[in-house]
Image (cartoon, rainbow, N blue to C red):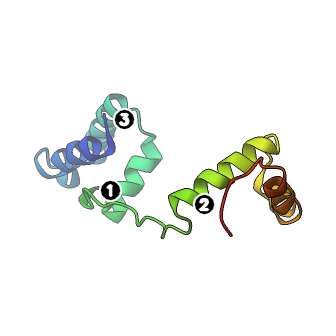
Amino acid sequence: MDMLSKNQYLKALIEQRGYLTKSKKEKGLLLDEFCKTTKQNRDYVIRKIRTGNYLKVGQTRKKRKQTYDETVKAALVECWKIFDFACGQRLEPLLKDEVERLRLFGELKCSG
């Protein structure tokens, strides 16, 4: 069950089955049913109801602006493989020192 379906189910639970007008015991039973069906944490569901986050159906996160084009990414991946899949902190100084040498020996073919 994806998040959109879970939010729609929670919205139906609240609006159609009258969650907000029920007694504390009835709310508990409805929450138990919802948590068992969706396998979501009870406290998380209560927080979603309290803040109204279940109403924000279909929102997507902003994507980051793309920094590098595909040719640069391909060259970077090639360097990453040559340097034995080093993490970013180790890869940065290696790139600064060794890219020119890799070009000289024909290991790396890129412009600039």
**Front label number (1 vs 2):** 2
- Snapshot quadrant of residue 104: bottom right
Using the numbered discs, state the Cα–Cα distance from disc 1 to disc 3 in whole angstroms.
13 Å
**Residue located 65% across and 54% down the image:** 75
Q: Amino acid at mark 1?
A: Ile
Q: Amino acid at mark 2?
A: Val
Taking 93 as reference, is 110 left or right? left
Name the residue carrying label 3.
Answer: 35
**Residue located 43% across and 64% down the image:** 63
Mark before the other along the chain sequence, 1 or 3: 3
Mark before the other along the chain sequence, 2 or 3: 3
Q: How many marks?
A: 3
Using the numbered discs, state the Cα–Cα distance from disc 1 to disc 2 in whole angstroms.
46 Å
Along the viewing direction, whichever of 78 and 60 lies nearer the viewer: 78
Dot 3, crowdedness within 10 Å: few (<14), some or many (≥20)? some
Name the residue carrying label 2.
Answer: 72
- Snapshot quadrant of residue 94: bottom right
Q: Position of residue 52 (x, y in %)?
A: 30, 62
Q: Position of residue 4 (x, y in %)?
A: 27, 46
Along the viewing direction, whichever of 71 and 54 lies nearer the viewer: 71
Name the residue carrying label 1.
Answer: 49
Taking 81 as reference, is 43 left or right? left
Using the numbered discs, state the Cα–Cα distance from disc 2 to disc 3 in whole angstroms.
46 Å
Q: Secondary structure at mark 3?
A: helix
Mark before the other along the chain sequence, 1 or 2: 1
